[in-house]
Image: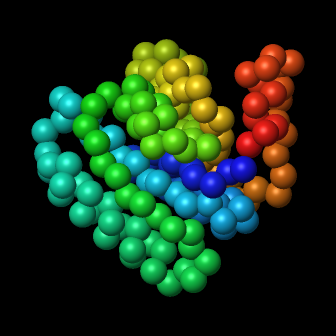
Amino acid sequence: MLKHFLVAIDDSDASGNALRIAARLALGVEAKVTVLRVIPLARKGPSEQDELLRLKDWLKSTYAVDQDAPTFTPAVIGGIPQVEISRYAESIGVDLVVLGRKVRSRTTRLMLGDTTDAVVRRNRLPTLLVPALLQDVRGMLVALDGTDRGSLVLSK
């Protein structure tokens, strides 16, 4: 059963949309949602504690009027986002990782890298990629590769 989602967010519209879609899906299965923000180590700026307060305020203001919001647990950690998202998801035992997918050209992805792609390659948990412009989810296609590991998706 899907009982706990992790949504990794940054300041992009794509991650905000991923959270909105995850919230809607979580309500349908009565799952809780951990909202994770990873602060890159090299970044100068607010502390993890300040970022956590900012994230809590943002969640409260964004979902305050929505009576149909799931239970959110905000979390902020420092590190390399591509590594820490998967590590954190495994450490707290989530059933599904939800990530926003930004619209980028192939050249930009090659030059700058892409956090979502890196997380998908490292992650051992089921992961849902939400396109930046997706408005609603009415159904899902789950591709299986015939392996025992791939079949675990059906048991979730």
Near-viewer residue (148 or 64) = 148
Near-viewer residue (95 or 16) = 95
Asked which quadrant contains residue 40, the reply is top left
Q: Is residue 127 something one can see in this rendering?
A: yes
Residue at point 76%, 35% (across, down): 153
Give the quarter of the figure containing the C terminus: top right
Residue at point 26%, 62% (across, down): 54
Asked which quadrant contains residue 155, the reply is top right
Residue at point 47%, 64% (across, down): 72
Please provide percent x and percent y for residue 150: 77, 24
Near-viewer residue (65 or 13) = 65
Residue at point 56%, 69% (across, down): 70
Asked if residue 66 is positioned above or below residue 13 in the image, the reply reads below
Direction from residue 127 to residue 9 in the image, left or right: left
Please provide percent x and percent y for residue 148: 79, 20
Near-viewer residue (132 or 148) = 148
